[in-house]
Structure formats: C-alpha cells, structure tokens
Image: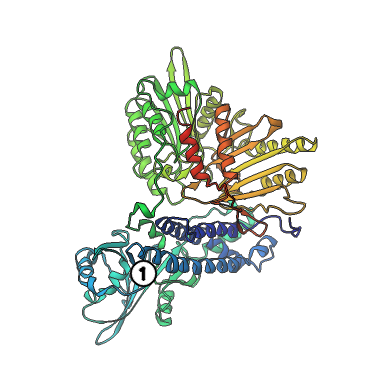
Amino acid sequence: MVQIPETKLFFDRDLSWLSFNERVLSEAERTHTPLLERIKFLSIYSSNLDEFYRVRMPILQALKKLSRKDNNEIRQEGGLLEEANQVINSQQEKFGVVLKNLVLPGLREHDIYFVYNEPIPQVLNNELSNYFLSQVLAFLQPIDLTEPDIQFFPNNNQLYFVVYVEYAQQAKSYVLNIPTDSLSRFYETKHEGKTYVFIIDDIIRDNLSLLFKAGEIKGSYSFKITRTAEIDLKDEYHNDVADLIEKQIQKRDLGLATRFLYEPNMPKMILDILVRHFDLGHATLVEGGRYHNLKDLADFPVKDVQLSNKKWAKIVYPSFRKNKSLHDQILENDLLINPPYQSYDSVLRFFNEAATDEQVIEIYTTLYRVANDSKIVNALITAAKNGKKVAVLVELKARFDEANNIKWAKKMKAAGVEIIYSVTALKVHAKVALVKRRQAIRNRYTGLFATGNFNETTANFYTDHILMTAHQEMLRELELLFIFLRKREKPIDPDLIHFNHLLVAQFNLQNRFLALIQREIDQANLGKAASIIIKLNNLEEEVMISKLYEASNAGVEIELIVRGICRLIPGAIGLSENIMVRRIVDRYLEHGRIFVFHNGGNEEVYLGSADWMNRNIYRRIEVCFPVYDEHIKKQLKKLLMLQLQDNVQAVYIDHEMKNVPVPSSNDNIQSQYAIYQYLNHKKND
C-alpha cells in the first residue's frame, strides 16, 4: 500500500492509454509468444500509436498552447504533451530493439530473411527490378515541388518518399507515393531454399533511376503525415474548457497535421522544404526509422503454422439441430454465445431464420461497425424483400467506419429497410436486436443483447458475449427503446421510459450502477460480505471511480479487469486499499463488459456495451442487461475466475500506472486458453 497526494485522485487518461500500448508492445518481446504473433503485436502497437496521434495529440497540443490561460483545468494538463512524447519515444526505441534484436534473428533461424534496413541481395536484383517495372511502376505518381502552381495535399498516414534529383540545369525535389493502397507492402520470394521478404519501399528506392532517367538521384527519404480525426471534446471537458480547446484546434487548416514522421538522415534543407510546403509548423516533427506504417506488419506474408499460435477449433454452440429452429431453442432457455471461442454461426443463424420465418413480422437492430461483407446486413435486406418490417439504426459517426456504414445503409434503404440515423450529438453504441413473431393471437419476442458489434469479422478476434433470450419483459423494454430511437430525439427526461430490467445510458444506467455499488457499501457497513467484480475496456468517468473508492473505504472487496484506459489508482492508502486492477493482453482482444455484485450471496450479474467513460455514460445510448439464467451466471463467473487467476498473460496495474507481472506458480493459467478448454468441455451441456 502507498500514500498518494490528496490532489492526485485519478491517473491521466492519455498516459494510461499509452501504458496499455506499452503492454501490447511487451507481448512482442516475450519469448513464449510465437514468432509470427510477435510480429502481429508490433503491428497492433504501431496501429494504436497512429490512432493516438490522430485522436489524442490534437488535444494535447491545444492544451499545451492554452496552458498559460487562467484556467486551472487547462493549466494542470498543459504539461502532458512533453510527458506523452517522452513515453512514446521510449516505446519507439523499444520497438526498434525488439524488431532488430529479437524478431529478425528469430526469423533467420527458420530460413526466413526479412530484408529490413539492409541492401537488397545482389542475386535478387533482377527479379525485384522486373517486379518494379511490371507491377509497381504504374502506380507511382511523382509530384514536382518546384512547380509554382502545384497543389498537393498528402493524405493521412499515406507513405511517401521525397526524392532529390539533380539535372544538368537544376535540382528538383519530388514527392513520390509508396502505393500500399494498391499493392502489398511486402514482396515474398524463395531462393536456394530460403524465404526472402522485402518491403516495397526498398524495391522502389532501389529502382528510382528507372523512373527519373534524365537526372541523378542524390537522395530519397521516406515520410508520412498523421492528421487529426474528428474529436468530441465535450466527452471529456466542461463546455467552456472544451470550447477553448476546440477554437485552438480550429485555428488550423482542416485535417490538422499532428505528426510529421521522417527518415533520420533527411537533410535539414529538404526537411525545411517539406515543413514549409505542407504547412507543418503545428505538427510534432518526429525523427523515425527508415520505415513507417509498420502496422502493415499485420500483412506479413509468411504463414508458417509452426511459428504461429495453434488454431483453436471453433466450438459450435448451441449444438446444431436441423429440425429445431434456433427460435425454439431460445424459447426453451436463454443461450450465451462467447465468440471467438464459440462459433459466430448461431448469431448469423438468428438473423437468417428471422429473415425467412413466415411468422416473423418485424425486426429491429442497431449496427455500429459493420463487416465489409456483412452477412447480417444481407439477411436484413432479405427480410425486407420478404415483406417484413425491418428497422435498423445505423451509427454514421462510428469513427473510421463512417464510409462503410453509409455504403451499407444505402443498400438497405434501397431494399426497403427503414434506416434510422442517430441524433447528431448522440451516438447509439448499444448492440441489440429484436424479432417480433405473430403466434396465434399474440406477439412473441426473441432478441439479442451483446457486448460487441454485430460484426462477423471482428468476432474472430474480439472476446464478447451475446445473450439470446425470450425474456418477454426485457424485450418489451427493448421495443420501447427502439420506438424512442425512431423519433431521433435526445432524451430530455431520464424517466421518459421506465426500465425495470435494462440499464440504458441517458436514462437509468449510471444511477442503477451507483445504487448497486451503494448496496455493497451498505452490506459492508453492516459487517457482512460485500464484493464487486467488474470487467471493462476502459475506466475513466470520475463519478463511478469515486464511488468505487467509497466502496473500498467501506471494506468492499473490488476486483477489476481493465484492458485499456484506467484512471482509477489502485492500492492507495485511504483511497483504494481494497481494489486490485488487472490487465490481460493475449491472442484475442478482451472486449466483453461484465459486472458482478455480491448482493448478500444472491449475486446479480450484468453484461453490456458500456464502458465507464464520459462518452458512454453521458453522450451515448448504451444498453447493459441482467443475466437471469443461473446456468449462464455460473458460466460467466467461471470465466471471470479464470481471468482473475491468470498469471501468464495478466499484469497488475500498480499505483504508478506500471504493468506489473502477476507472479508465476507451479500451476500457471493462461486465461484465454483455459476459457477455450472450459467452453469446449461444456459445449454439449
């Protein structure tokens, strides 16, 4: 236990997020992680960092500029930019060490030569030049920066070279695209029993003389520009502070450049030309490595099963019965699907059966992030064409998925699906579906409540929970929510809909969770057993954290599993002595939200779409839902216990925000594999 200053009650959210990415990076250096999986974690780290520069850096840069203003909230946070940059620089150094000293030698031990930051072997020059001339050259579009009227806007995170060429009369600087939007970043070939992998950057660089034939290549240097994404600052700050930061950001051009990443040997003269030409005065100039966008390592072409995680066969649950519909099975008892351990086919079957069942008259669902080739959307289109009333709330403000969601919304609308768009200032993040059947003289409901998106692609690597239920009272409450959402209004009265079962953000979610924590406090004050187990992606919102502190001080035992941002400081004297926080990073992305309250021994269990963040609680429609089936409650508790026992992939988050390994033992538990084994054993129950 440690004593912390009374003024420091919460970790910073951005530094906490960087701590999570540090944990991702550390997975790439662990010797027990299969070699190709280590490459995957390097890719995830790089992708995460790019998003940080798009989403968070604009705010930190604005806070820095405003830190001298007479506003205490801004003044306290004005120094975060330097601290974040120090953390990132340290992590980037570690990234380079892991790749150079661990991954590359490991590949070579298996006769895989990833040619990285070294000359192309002479024996393969002709083959690579032929590839350049036949496949790459058509996509190259050099831009002459010396032309007076040139209008060129480098795209976000697109890779470029600046090429310095000397001609007889003058020298010119060109910007040349590296066409990874059209071609693979990697080229794989075999020679004398060895596998060689080349980065397309090197193939282009080595053949520039075939493009600029009339001049002499004096230098080529890679760079990329990261630009800001849309940011809703009111998710985090009071209105006046948010407005100040917003104005600071809006002083700059659309698509603010937050980072200019360039090759370290780029001459200052050329660097100055690019900064001036692309108006990069506000961007953070970062001297990186020879290569950028190493998130592309996700597409590393070598697929050697011996160097990867052994695949776990998807568990089919519920057991398939050809002559019994999924609807009838749900009427018998609730079902819980746990992808990616269990097959997502049951979810697809739910929508497919509803689309073709003659008794189904209405289907309602929310779609937040849609798969590129969505079978669920195709089922909804089929349902509409079969004469069913289909209403879909499509969230157009799902960051980075806007275009794909719009594409599918247009297709559904053309097929006769009623498309509902959320209110501009209110995202709908709930993951729910409702099917209404006409049976005899009354309607009967079945539905899905999920912790993750209805997306069969992400279901392969996000751990989530999907409850299939025929609980009529819960589903009637869900129908009332859909009726409200179709009005496209922000809820002005939290009592507008009286939810007895569901916890819905903007209505009763926060108050109900606070009441559930208070009940544990009351039990502890009476000297009775009291405990809380919560699993979240992110824990940020101060009211909820403060209530957990209050519960800790009352003697409530609190176990938290938080994958990403965690602003709660654990293990602090007089604040959080009874709170432990774990973080689990493994082959799958931990994504499910689970809430367990001891309740005097009669445990209450909830699942849901809501993290405890400002945006989830105050600015979105989220749905958390109770689990009433005792068998499912027991199963969820078992999954949580396995995660709380994890001493292979889990770490503790300590009072300094460090990732502290859980001590190993003679009985080591890797929770994701243990969960797979448990569910595989239980598949026929």
Residue in front for this viewpoint, 479 or 297: 297
Q: Position of residue 500 (x, y in %)?
A: 62, 27
Above or below residue 524? Residue 195 is below
Examine the image and state in which quarter residue 188 appears.
Answer: bottom left
Residue 187 visible here: yes
Type of the residue with mark 1: Tyr
Examine the image and state in which quarter residue 496 appears.
Answer: top right
Q: Position of residue 428 (x, y in %)?
A: 51, 41
Query: Would residue 677 be found to the left or right of residue 197 on screen?
Result: right
Disc 1 packing (10 Å; few <14; some 14–19; many ≥20): some
Q: Circle 1 sits in a helix, a strand or a loop, which is it? A: loop
Q: Position of residue 365 (x, y in %)?
A: 45, 33
Residue in front for this viewpoint, 508 or 348: 348
Which residue lies under the disc numbered 1?
Answer: 116
Above or below residue 482? Residue 137 is below
Residue lying at the far top of the rendered structure? 441
Quadrant of the frame with the N terminus: bottom right
Residue lying at the far bottom of the rendered structure? 169
Q: Residue at 34% of width from left, 25% of height from top?
A: 356
